[in-house]
Structure formats: structure tokens, C-alpha cells
């Protein structure tokens, strides 16, 4: 086998796995942000309803 081809294939595989890991980490880090936004909207809605009473 050609050693240059082996290195190139390994670099491509590493790049693909790294891109996949970055996508997973980004998705996981977005979950608390989305939950915080949802809680903030819920809290604002509760305050609005309380002030309307």
C-alpha cells in the first residue's frame, strides 16, 4: 500500500470524526440555552398573568 494514501485516509477519517464530535458538542451545549429561553418565556408569561389579576 502507498503510505501517503494511508496517511491521507487517516487524516480524512480524523477530520470526519472531529466534525461529527463538534456537531454533537454544539447540539448538547445548545440544550441548556434553549431550556433557559423556554423558562424565561414561561416566567414572563406567569408574571404577565399575575399582574393582570
Image (tube, rainbow, N blue to C red):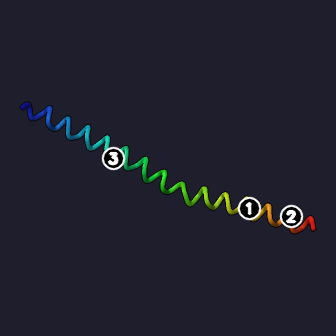
Query: Which quadrant would residue 20 be assigned to in this image?
Result: top left
- Of the numbered discs 2 and 1, the one sitting upstream in the chain is 1
Q: Are marks 2 and 1 in contact (CB under 8 Å)?
A: no
**Looking at the image, is 25 positioned above or below residue 51?**
above
Which residue carries the number 1 mark? 42
Q: Residue at x 87, y 68 (%)?
A: 50
Q: Position of residue 11 (x, y in %)?
A: 23, 40
Residue for badge 2: 49
User: Foreground: 45 or 9?
Assistant: 45
Tell me the SS state at disc 3: helix
Q: Position of residue 51 (x, y in %)?
A: 90, 67
Residue that label 3 marks? 18
> Residue at 37% of width from left, 44% of height from top?
19
Nearest the viewer among 45 and 2 is 45
Question: Of tags 2 and 3, which is closer to the observer?
Answer: 2
Residue nearest the viewer, comparing 3 with 27 = 27
Which quarter of the picture shows residue 33? bottom right
Mark 2 residue crowding within 10 angstroms, few (<14) / some (14–19) / many (20+): few
Q: Secondary structure at mark 1?
A: helix
Pointer 2 or 3: first along the chain: 3
Most distant residue in the left direction:
1
Q: Quadrant of the N terminus?
A: top left
Q: Nearer the viewer, residue 41 or 11?
A: 41
Badge 3: how crowded within 10 Å, few (<14), some, or many (20+)?
few
Amino acid at each position: 500500500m502507498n503510505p501517503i494514501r494511508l496517511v491521507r485516509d487517516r487524516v480524512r477519517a480524523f477530520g470526519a470524526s472531529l466534525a461529527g464530535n463538534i456537531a454533537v458538542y454544539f447540539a448538547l451545549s445548545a440544550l441548556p440555552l434553549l431550556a433557559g429561553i423556554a423558562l424565561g418565556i414561561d416566567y414572563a408569561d406567569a408574571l404577565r398573568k399575575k399582574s393582570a389579576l
